[in-house]
Image (cartoon, grey):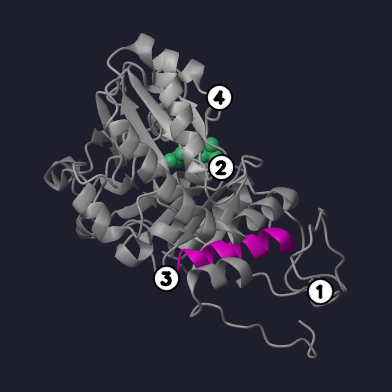
Amino acid sequence: MTTDEPSRHDWTRAGFATRAIHAGQDPDPTTGAVVPPIYQVSTFKQDGVGGLRNGYEYSRSANPTRAALEEALEAVESGARGFAFSSGLAAEDTLLRATLRPGDHVVVPDDAYGGTYRLIARVFGPWGIEHTAVDLSDVDAVAAAIDQGRTKAVWVETPTNPLLGIADIAALSALARAAGAVLAVDNTFGTPYLQQPLALGADVVVHSTTKYIGGHSDVVGGALVVADGAQLPVGLMGPTGTTSLADAIGFHQNSSGAVAGPFDSWLTLRGLKTLALRMDRHCSNALTVATFLRDHPAVTQVIYPGLPEHPGHEVASRQMSGFGGMVAFRVGSVEKALDVCARTRVFTLAESLGGVESLIEHPGRMTHASVAGSALEVPDDLVRLSVGIEDVADLVADLGQALA
Ligand SMILES: *Cc1c(COP(=O)(O)O)cnc(C)c1O
């Protein structure tokens, strides 16, 4: 750091949209560039052996564009440290390696994102990690699933994918804390704009930034944001000789190396700047679409946490400032579900979610095919929508013609 550089502004007290646009993104001190440049570089000149400029040595360990994204993510989740990865699953993999050891047990949602379940059951399972899948909306069931002394992590997803179940983060965090386990919350569907898990007691937030944070279906990425003071599970000493969860994750991020590249980091940062605006529109469009589907005779059930009849509506109203852009509905048979997916024109048939454009998919045969036959299997007449930010009249008309 040179002495004539102005001291960096503290954005932590600013509002959400201001943090998303400015935190970690001060104008470039050399050129005045108003957004962080893409530092497409692998290594950095040292001013004499060990004389690093601002700590930069090699881009796996740290890269200025990724550092800007990590600081911005940390600010929008109100956390102490952010880490950016090459995908959401890379972030999850790093978190699980940092917190679990052979013989440990983890509690997982019984309708977790399919890839999360596959990672825990089929990658970590053979390495000696056991898991129990439970309905996280049932706090007593979670309490019963915790094996005192052996459960080292409770994995929360809320709202869940694809059934949009709601878990009470504050209640589950109290259970995890009492067990000495880490409480991780996958906030991909909630987004930091609508839900702040660290403020509700979570130790670490997980993101697939591929989804709402990136927001434009043009980049795959993941993130972890750790709460101030968060610790490893009770009894575990981290690889750097501390019990700090952030230190352990930092060590694993550098040691395993599944980092976000400079261009991916830049795209994700660009998406993050408009997250607040986009989420407002996602929420209002999704509510209009859910209400339309609820009143449609071809639809047997609509699942949206913003509808008062949703079983998690009360908890979601308490812990979220909006209900998000994901809607699921059932049509009575797999044939009808596949037919609707084939007939929409504005909703594109594709996996993934959270982009500006609306998507439709059949979880049973697409995103959740990997959990068929497991406790996480989803109904085969279920259709999932990622409601985009187009004109809502066009979205409703498109679903209307597809269901006719
Ligand atoms: C997509 C997704 C992931 C995995 O993220 P990738 O970026 O695809 O690796 C994890 N959790 C949720 C809820 C997701 O939707």
| Residue 229 x/y as whole percent | 40, 70
- Spatial CA distance of label 1 from label 2 is 42 Å
- Spatial CA distance of label 4 from label 1 is 57 Å
Residues tagged 1 and 2 counted as in contact (Cβ below 8 A) = no
Task: Tell which tag, 2 or 4, sits nearer the viewer.
Answer: 4
- Secondary structure character of the magenta stretch overall: helix
| Callout 4: SS | loop
Q: Quadrant of residue 46?
A: bottom right
Q: Residue furthest bottom?
A: 4
Compared to residue 263, the image places residue 10 above or below, namely below
> Label 1 CB, ligand 1: below 8 Å?
no
Between disc 2 and disc 4, whose residue precedes? 4
Identify the residue at horizontal 48%, vertical 59% (top origin). 225
Task: Tell which tag, 2 or 3, sits nearer the viewer.
Answer: 2
- 369 horizontally vs 31: left or right: left
Residue 109 shown in magenta: no
- Spatial CA distance of label 2 from label 3 is 30 Å
Residue topped by disc 3: 228
Q: Residue furthest top?
A: 335
Query: For the residue marked with disc 3, what is the amino acid?
Result: Asp
Query: For the residue marked with disc 4, what is the amino acid?
Result: Arg
| Callout 2: SS | loop
Name the mark on residue 345. Answer: 4
Residue topped by disc 1: 51
Magenta stretch, residue numbers: 62-78
Compared to residue 321, the image places residue 359 above or below, namely above
Query: For the residue marked with disc 2, what is the amino acid?
Result: Gly
Name the mark on residue 355. Answer: 2
Residues tagged 2 and 4 counted as in contact (Cβ below 8 A) = no
Between disc 3 and disc 1, whose residue precedes? 1
Task: Tell which tag, 3 or 4, sits nearer the viewer.
Answer: 4
